[in-house]
Image (cartoon, helix red, strand yellow):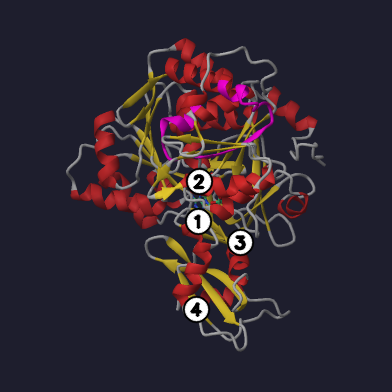
Amino acid sequence: MSTATPGGFAPWPAAYAERYRAAGWWRGETFGQMLRDRSAAHPDRVAIVDGDRRWTYRELDERADRLAAGLLGQGIGKDDKVVVQLPNTAEFFEIVFALFRIGALPVFALPAHRESEIRYFCEFTEAVAYVIADVHAGFDHRTLAAKVRADVPTLRHVFVVGDPGEHTSLAGIAQEPVDIHGGPRPDDLAFLQLSGGSTGIPKLIPRTHDDYIYSLRGSNDICAIDEDSVYLCVLPAAHNFPLSSPGTLGALYAGARVVLCPRSDPDTAFPLIEREGVTVTGLVPPLALLWIEAAERGGYDLSSLEVLLVGGAKFSEEAARRVRPALGCTLQQVFGMAEGLVNYTRLDDPEEVIVTTQGRPISPDDEILIVDGEDNALPPGATGHLLTRGPYTIRGYWNAPEHNARSFTEDGFYRTGDVVRRTESGHLVVEGRAKDQINRGGEKIAAEEVENHLLAHPAVHDASVVAVPDPYLGERTCAYVILRAGAEPLKAPAIKKFVRERGLAAYKVPDRVEFVDAFPQTGIGKISKRDLRAHGGA
Ligand code: AMP
Ligand code: DBH
């Protein structure tokens, strides 16, 4: 059994760590050194394109050094947590590599997160700093930051990209580079990633340099990323999919070029693909559909695009079949999770495999178990719960012993909560989900988290949030609400407004609210979400 260290991180047992090193999966690399090496190998190649800005590898490396010195100068050092919430901008990479270099841990928030999530990340990780853009998508992050900073005593700094207002300019803290002593080791944590979660509070995922870099190297091999690749980052850069599958970090590992897309619509992305000669990108299914439809209308030269990765939620076979004709590129389905395991269809898989499966694991050392409700292995081809263990799958969430007891088996397998079957070729087909989560077009929502916010309303007696089918998003959320006896009558918009004003990310605000007198129950008197879902689909 793995034991948690004081840092709240459950490392791989020594025998596994040795095996993964001996097999050559973990090679003792760190992110800081990786950027240094790429910069030394080809300093003048472009690493990051953000609008009119083009940073070479040398420039990114030097900027990371100056910012690392600046962070040290502010008293930020190894193992400190820094919540990073930035849109797709070059500064995201500057700060993240600066933190990697000094061994401080970025906590990857998404641009959509609001006060409820940010406050939790800052409090739970005892973050010392919070990095934001001034205003993004019409939202002033500085106001939120001021509130959180006033309440969270550990949070000493707010660094802003753009106009800092009452806070500190990120650009302003950069200093002459210094020698960094005692930077991170390859088996140290590199960052905390977010889980889509299925509980009331989000869980944090501790990833090491060794394990994450292995997932990048493996992804690059499978996705044919090399130094001539041009990766377009369309999804929010901090999300595990565009970060690592193979993502921006995979591209930088390969010495390739990353092009940042500020918005995901075809009118923004297609001209960039044309201008920059983008070869590969990754999308969630609803966006892939939107792009297919836009490409079918024509107007842009997308001929540089070789591979489109689609994942985050189930991509329908019908949509999958349209990718090659519409976009003229190979579809690569990807079924991954920030906890680790990532599956890809292979570029040379038969078309039928590409359109009907969600791929197979990166590593020969990814262990896959498909089990029934009592953890008994099922016969080949049967549909069941997916458990996994391997060289880049965590052994536990960060500082979450109770969750870990439920989310991991005694022998260290992660309970993915996904229901899958495996084909004879070893490819996985995602058939459903056992976790209490809604997958809203790739954005994961923990039902319990939203239910807790609904329950905070004085007129709400009980609440249950379930997924209902949606032709575009795949699923969206429906909140079933029982009002308190004698409470003022409430309408759906008031409930949504209440949740939004509690500072929850907009994608978690229920799409639909239904008032009911009672919930359907299971045989032993629990709320039957299955019956609620059936009701919502009607
Ligand atoms: P997270 O654990 O928050 O990183 O979310 C990962 C989850 O997203 C997986 O466990 C699946 O439930 C879902 N997911 C990711 N990719 C796919 C896919 N290609 N098809 C179906 N579900 C997916
Ligand atoms: O949904 C995900 O979390 C995801 C999807 C595709 C992921 O983490 C990944 C690839 O790495």
* Mark pair 2, 4: CA separation: 29 Å
Residue 141 higher or lower than 223, as above or below: below
Ranked by sequence position, the earlier of labels 1 and 2 is 2
Visible in this render: residue 320? Answer: no
Three-letter code, disc 4: Glu
Three-letter code, disc 1: Ala
Residue marked by disc 1: 505
Q: Are marks 3 and 4 in contact (CB under 8 Å)?
A: no
Residue 362: percent from the left, percent from the top? 56, 36
Magenta span contains residue 72: yes
Q: Quadrant of the N terminus?
A: top right
Q: Which residues are magenta?
A: 70-94
Residue marked by disc 4: 514
Residue 508 higher or lower than 69, as above or below: below
Visible in this render: residue 13? Answer: yes
**Crowding near pointer 1: few (<14 within 10 Å), some, many (20+)?**
some
Three-letter code, disc 3: Glu
